[in-house]
Amino acid sequence: MVTESKLTVVMYHYVRDLENSRYPRINGLAIDRFRGQLDYLAKHHTFVRVEDVMAACRGDQALPSDAVLLTFDDGYADNYRYAFPLLDERGVQGCFFPPVASLRDRVVLDVNKIHFALAAIGDVEAIATFCLEKVAAWRDEYGLEEPGYYESHLARTSRFDDPRTLFVKDLLQRGLPETVRSRLTDEVFRRFVSVDEKAFAEELYLTMDQAQTMRRHGHYFGAHGLSHRWLDSLPAEEQRAELQVSLELMRQLGYRDGEFVVSYPYGGFDEHTLPVARELGFGLGFSVEARTATIGQDDPLLLPRLDTVDLPFSG
Ligand SMILES: [Zn+2]
């Protein structure tokens, strides 16, 4: 019997020394704000571990009424550099979700190429223009629509971005056919950020050694797909392949059956995703739906998470 209990799951992405970094405009959380949020959470919540949440979902134990779990997506080296020591100092567990392409293959994820291009020049219009010119030039080759079509058909509002930034992200993440998207994202990255993708990846992402060290210190690692694609844009078999490869990486990190957790890239899922995840043996899954979870009510494979910006930054 599962006791109903509330669980706040907080989602972090870039937690970094923004001011002194080469990309101060990246949409990240500065270290002192992170520290302030930990103070706030320590005052108002009880930190719990992934193992506690799993036990609660099985009905083996109840969570404290003010439980909070911290999660970090995308596997950044910053997690090791900044979050890891701050969490350790306070005895708080973090759950980290590195995609296989970044952790193992040292490839810069498309999502990061876009973020760093936007941060590098701070002129979203220049990137939008660059993209639309390419769309026009490649129209025949790929059977694309007129540039104006994409401007009028893509997403306009989000919680986090102004309309033009959202347009660029949506065009490069979902709007264009996949082959065009990755070619264009590569060109944007080379033009506005760096021609040395390998070096950039080495600087940006966690290594296996770092992940092992964090795990030895009690932190948790979960799956975030192979190449950070929207699972709901893929047929069931490709979704399975994305999650399977990711699960094998978790095995390499020492996790066994019954211990696998997943964060769906961009929070994307469809009617195939949960059955596939369940079949592969995932016990917990995290979405990006911004609300507090209720254990015993929410599907354990679809636990909502608040974004860091949804919570105060001082205790
Ligand atoms: Zn992600």
Image (tube, helix red, strand yellow):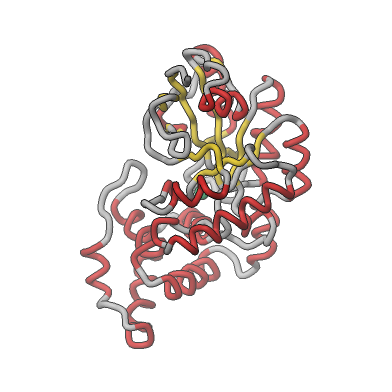
Considering only vertical position in the picture, is 17 above or below 186? above
Q: Nearer the viewer, residue 67 or 11?
A: 67
Q: Is residue 120 visible?
A: no
Considering only vertical position in the picture, is 166 above or below 160? below
**Count of numbered marks:** 0
Residue in the picture at 67% in, 47% down? 250
Residue in the picture at 55% in, 38% down? 283
Residue in the picture at 62% in, 46% down? 75
Q: Is residue 43 left or right of residue 178?
A: right
Q: Nearer the viewer, residue 65 or 163?
A: 65
Residue 120 position, x and y percent, is 51, 57
Residue that lies at the very extreme toward the front in this rendered image: 1
Q: Nearer the viewer, residue 38 or 31?
A: 38
Residue 266 position, x and y percent, is 44, 49
Considering only vertical position in the picture, is 29 above or below 157? above
Q: Is residue 132 visible?
A: yes
Considering only vertical position in the picture, is 92 above or below 121? above
Residue in the picture at 39% in, 61% down? 233
Q: Is residue 166 left or right of residue 109?
A: left
Residue 253 position, x and y percent, is 73, 45
Residue 12 position, x and y percent, is 52, 37
Q: Quadrant of residue 232?
A: bottom left
